[in-house]
Image: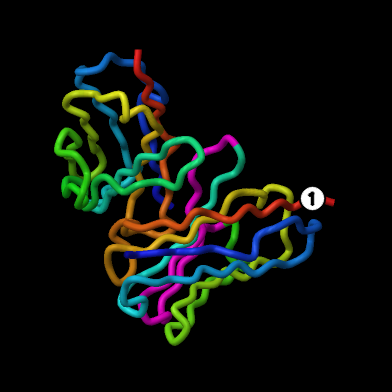
Amino acid sequence: DIQMTQSPSSVSASVGDRVTITCRASQGIRNWLAWYQQKPGKAPNLLIFAASNLQSGVPSRFSGSGSGTDFTLTISSLQPEDSATYYCQGTNSFPLTFAGGTKVEIK
Amino acid sequence: QVQLVESGGGVVQPGRSLRLSCAASGFTFSSYGMHWVRQAPGKGLEWVAVISYDGNNKYYEDSMKGRFTISRDNSKNTLYLQMNSLRAEDTAVYYCAKDLGILSLGKDYWGQGTLVTVSS
């Protein structure tokens, strides 16, 4: 099974800061990766699919990159509403494992 | 608009069974893969299972294989999760989610979740 790891597990940043979250797969998954945002008490929300494709309706300050084993989610200018936990997940090799998540807090 | 409404959660004793349902509307249900994802209290997301648009392909998380069965009825626009031999560690909010594609590309719509509590 492919394992997914994220870093950091938490980050605290100021409004307007650039925030980068990394996700690593234990084996190559080409560009088969999705990113999700989850706020407390709510269902997750798809941000990025196929590693770099912005889901419809998601603000353009979110972007994804990477291929193979190493991936990045970037928030170019952090906003108060971005306070949430972010998860990556491989999408082509079963079982589909979520990484442990990154909690983003606003300073 | 896309709606996914889960039902069937509740309190169940260890070793018993439960069937979850997810009623879908607002899209062509028979054209998309569907997932179950769970989240234990205070924990991260855990993928459970996926079923292809036509029901012919099913995949499971290893720890649930043999105990859980995912199925769908495209004539009723409904997704199911049959859970047998439930354990305390199966306690979680269970979400159904629609895929972007026919099997697995990304989950673009989610239900509100249904809580399953396994306890004696």
**Can the viewer see residue B67?**
no
**Can the viewer see residue A44?**
yes
Residue B86 belongs to the span the image colors magenta: no
Q: Left or right: B21 with respect to B119?
A: left
Rendered location of residue B113, percent (x, y): 53, 54
Rendered location of residue B45, percent (x, y): 48, 45
Residue B44 belongs to the span the image colors magenta: yes
The residue positioned 41% from the left and 55% from the top of the image is A96
Specify the quadrant that holds the N terminus of chain B: bottom left
Up the image or down, B6 lies above or below A90; here it is below
Task: Estimate how packed mark 1 is, as few (under 14), some (14 to 19) or many (20 or more) residues with alpha carbons within 10 Å.
Answer: some
- Front residue (pair B93, A93): B93
Rendered location of residue B61, percent (x, y): 51, 58
Up the image or down, B42 lies above or below A48; here it is above
Rendered location of residue B3, percent (x, y): 40, 64
**Residue named by callout 1:** B119
Pointer 1 chain: B
Snapshot colouring: rainbow
The residue positioned 47% from the left and 61% from the top of the image is B96
- Front residue (pair A13, B105): A13
Q: Give, as a three-letter code, the residue at label 1.
A: Ser
Please report the bounds of the magenta region as a residue range. Answer: B42-62
The residue positioned 43% from the left and 52% from the top of the image is A1
- Front residue (pair A77, A86): A77
- Front residue (pair B26, A68): B26
The secondary element bearing badge 1 is classed as: loop
The residue positioned 51% from the left and 76% from the top of the image is B71
